[in-house]
Amino acid sequence: MSGSLEETSSAPGTRTIGQYLIDRLTELGVGHMFGIPGDYILTFFKLVEESPIEMVVTTNELAAGYAADAYARLKGIGVACVTYAVGGFSLTNALACAYAEKSPVVVISGAPGLRENKRNVLLHHMVGPSTTQLAVFEHLTVASCVLDDPLTAFREVDRVLNACLRHKRPVYIEIPRDRVTMTPIHPHSPLVEAPISDSDELREATGEALAMLWSSKSPVILAGIELNRFKLADSVLRFAEKHKIPIASTLLSKSVIRERHPLYVGVYQAAMGRPQVTKFVEESDCVLMLGAMLTDVDTGIFTHKLDQNRVIFATSESVQIRYHHYQGILLSDFVSKLCDASLPNYARTIPKDSNPISEPWEAKRDEAITVRRLFQKVNAILGEKVTVIADPGDALFGAADLAVLDTAEFLGSAFYATLGWAVPASIGAQRAHPEHRPIVLVGDGAFQMTGMELGTTRRGGFNPIVIVLNNKGYLTERFLLEGKFNDIPDWKYHKLPEVIGTGIGFEVRTEGELDRALSEALENTESFSLLNVHLAQTDFSPGLKRLGEGLSKRV
Amino acid sequence: MSGSLEETSSAPGTRTIGQYLIDRLTELGVGHMFGIPGDYILTFFKLVEESPIEMVVTTNELAAGYAADAYARLKGIGVACVTYAVGGFSLTNALACAYAEKSPVVVISGAPGLRENKRNVLLHHMVGPSTTQLAVFEHLTVASCVLDDPLTAFREVDRVLNACLRHKRPVYIEIPRDRVTMTPIHPHSPLVEAPISDSDELREATGEALAMLWSSKSPVILAGIELNRFKLADSVLRFAEKHKIPIASTLLSKSVIRERHPLYVGVYQAAMGRPQVTKFVEESDCVLMLGAMLTDVDTGIFTHKLDQNRVIFATSESVQIRYHHYQGILLSDFVSKLCDASLPNYARTIPKDSNPISEPWEAKRDEAITVRRLFQKVNAILGEKVTVIADPGDALFGAADLAVLDTAEFLGSAFYATLGWAVPASIGAQRAHPEHRPIVLVGDGAFQMTGMELGTTRRGGFNPIVIVLNNKGYLTERFLLEGKFNDIPDWKYHKLPEVIGTGIGFEVRTEGELDRALSEALENTESFSLLNVHLAQTDFSPGLKRLGEGLSKRV
């Protein structure tokens, strides 16, 4: 596809490189950054402190990266701000996650000043040549730059931020500490990119897609994660409503469509999903996949049975119809053409789904709590203004069945599947949507990785409810291959509030205890609540059960 | 330099790729690995479980990397074992540290099997092409390989391990999960590298160096970290004793020479060091630098005044005499030639040093504890079989003045300076030297990053004494530029044992409390002890005071 570059009319001035970067990010909606100070980035931290942006100092850089990622998923852009090397290399995994799952995260890293960084000089934090960090991040970003020259720095900021917004993937901005306060050599006006589709490709592809839809009796939409990233979910929903086309989501895109919407079918996961949902999607005579990624998780480890002759697969990277591709079409233009088209009213009947956790909850007070019942209870308390954040593992597989109420109320690392994502993500999510309360579902192994990020809630404005699924081990691995390496020491997670100095902890073994703890947690809006839920080592969710059954059927 | 490759006579057989890797590492002295399981590495974990090697499962991969690094510093090789991407990218910072500070760490990473990893297939944990992780690690290692072919895999293991041992820097071994149990196509004998020096270069360089030493009246040895890495410290000490040449160390190499040895001068840090040590080294008419790295930390931010015309600077990478270099000389051969040479008896008098923390300790019971007094007390309790592990920041600057008793009893990330290194490092250190007890000095900011690694002590055999210097902030940054980003929430660190389920915690505000806490900690040999030592926000160590004074004199 081609693109045009528009010079906007903002007045040139003598803003410094650092200030320009802050201003551009503010214009894009950044109200918070996440990071850890360090000497190479201190000057920039001071500039941020003097700006309208709040710097949320996390416990470590990996957590800052996860928080920025969650913030980006909700706000359209997120920023992690770190010092050179010790900071940057500590968040590579968060950036890899953002890259894999298409989250527009901007990493701003300090660096040694050009004046101090001479040949053969070993400055603290350096790893080989000073370009090492840039070289590493080039593999994990869609654009990167070093703001080492006031002639090019302003243009470079524009280029890199445009790439971030266009691809919804991470970018890397390195700023040597002695360049932060430099001013432009020439006046600079921000350069905003407005990419456009190739009109011939768009016409042909839309024509083909509409012809397939016209000849279809029972189409279905598979709404992928890019509908969230490119803010197209509302348009697609209106399109679906206009023609009464049912919509399924993937696990990665769960909640991109309101799950209690009458056209919503459920989370499609092939053999790993609920049978009714799988059957409904796979029996459709046309599958309109919009912004989806065909990952192993989202296809139930490639058990999906979707006849490619009946698939229209549009993403930000290409539009594929049956077996051919169009490379020059913007997803937004494709969706827009669909919205404008005239199509039949399909009015498919969506079968009543037997969600294993949707029965009304009534506690059997002294019964030991099971995984299934835990998810049933969580499902029962889901209300408005709640964001469910699920960590990979059974917390995520089980959460697939939760019926969240509104859009963008479910977050999970459902493709990259990085353990320990959820608690730090809740920090970013609550700064992005301060009026939404996070409910975090996290396994004990994952919680041990990053759970101390709850310490950051002391900075105010956070009240997540964190539910630790404590089965003393890496459950999904036990499932595959048992060994003592799957055992995890049984911490008293509910005592963490005593260490951190805020929050309320609960130890839960029975359904009655779960009821009481969640009631108190919902009432405690001033701080985090943590439920240490003891579960049997071999107990697991309906979602994981389906995965096992689906895989065994496949073999 | 050239090198010869010797085929050893170990019998070829049908060992699998995974088993061969384990066997080679065992032969090199690896008794423990550090890691986290994950599905792509599970088969290998199971093989390790069935081997004599103990797999220490840490709380997260970064900690596994730090632990393997500390283990490598003490044992000559260390191994971190992780799953693909989510595991590998989580420890890049530990590997960067090992690269910068020359620590021979082997990373073994699982990967998707070749049979499942087809074109355009999105497998969980993948970030772009499946080669992304290799591409990243190539920047942080001296050799790397993917064991994807049983024809080459065995040879590749040899090549990569040889590079690790030769350069004492990290290497990366990726093993697709369906290759772990494959057997060789042809018989394979381990290939052990025996690099040798260029004899002409060695003769000329040694001749020059000895001539300089002969014409010197007051030489000094600056013993660098490579003497530890290449196990040359004993030879150099015998050389020094033979000719009565005084020896200083750097902060990075502190304890490479026993600090209570009569020839030991102290830690040389130029303007940042103790004045007597700086004066003594800089007044020497010949400085024999062996295996040192001229970093900003070790040169007191480049305040060192060493006349290059009087410097012999030998490292594993080159021998530099005055202004010219020799590139083909092994450090071990150069040291060996010095040891064999005939030289005068120099018998320089080492001035009595006024170490600010070496006075005998007597508690003023109700006095608030200060940083200086804390270090004085720690100095007073240092005994045999103690490893001091200092985290970067004032914990490290202050620890520079500690007089540790034996060699290899001080560990710190004194060049790469990565916060949060010390607690996980203590896990590796104690597995490497089980009879040595770690005393960990760590700031509150650093402790919040990785301190939960104390949870791993529940796996048995660990009893570190962890002293948290709790000044509620990033002190060394406050020193440079104040801002609220330097504030750190005041956790009740001493209550962590209640969460982890082992250990003893102490809260310390006065000298009397410090005395009591350390007495109890020394008696508690069964679990970790944690001292939460409250310090004034603006208090700092004599070492950091000298840094400030040194820098202000320089400006």
Image: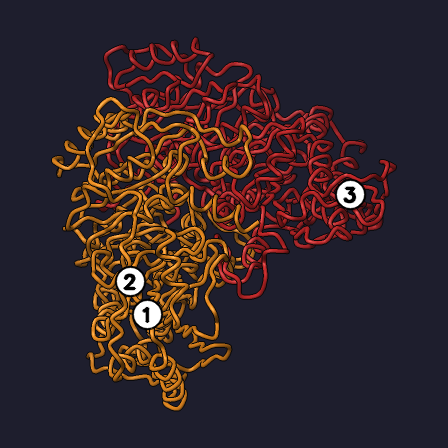
Chain colours: A orange, B red
Q: Indicate the amino acid at tag 1.
A: Leu
- Say few, some or many: other residues with alpha carbon within 10 Å of mark 2 (under 14 / 14 to 19 / 20 or more): many
| Residue A503, horizontal then vertical, whole percent | 20, 32
Q: Is residue A537 above or below residue A138?
A: above
Mark pair 3, 2: CA separation: 60 Å
Residue to which mark 1 is pinned: A165
Q: Is residue B246 visible?
A: no
Left or right, B225 with reference to B345: left
Q: Are marks 3 and 2 in contact (CB under 8 Å)?
A: no
Picture quarter containing residue B510?
A: top left
Left or right, B309 with reference to A454: right
In the rendering, which numbered label is found on residue B206?
A: 3
Residue to which mark 2 is pinned: A77
Mark 3, secondary structure of its residue: helix
Earlier-in-chain disc, 1 versus 2: 2
The foreground one among B483 and A546 is A546
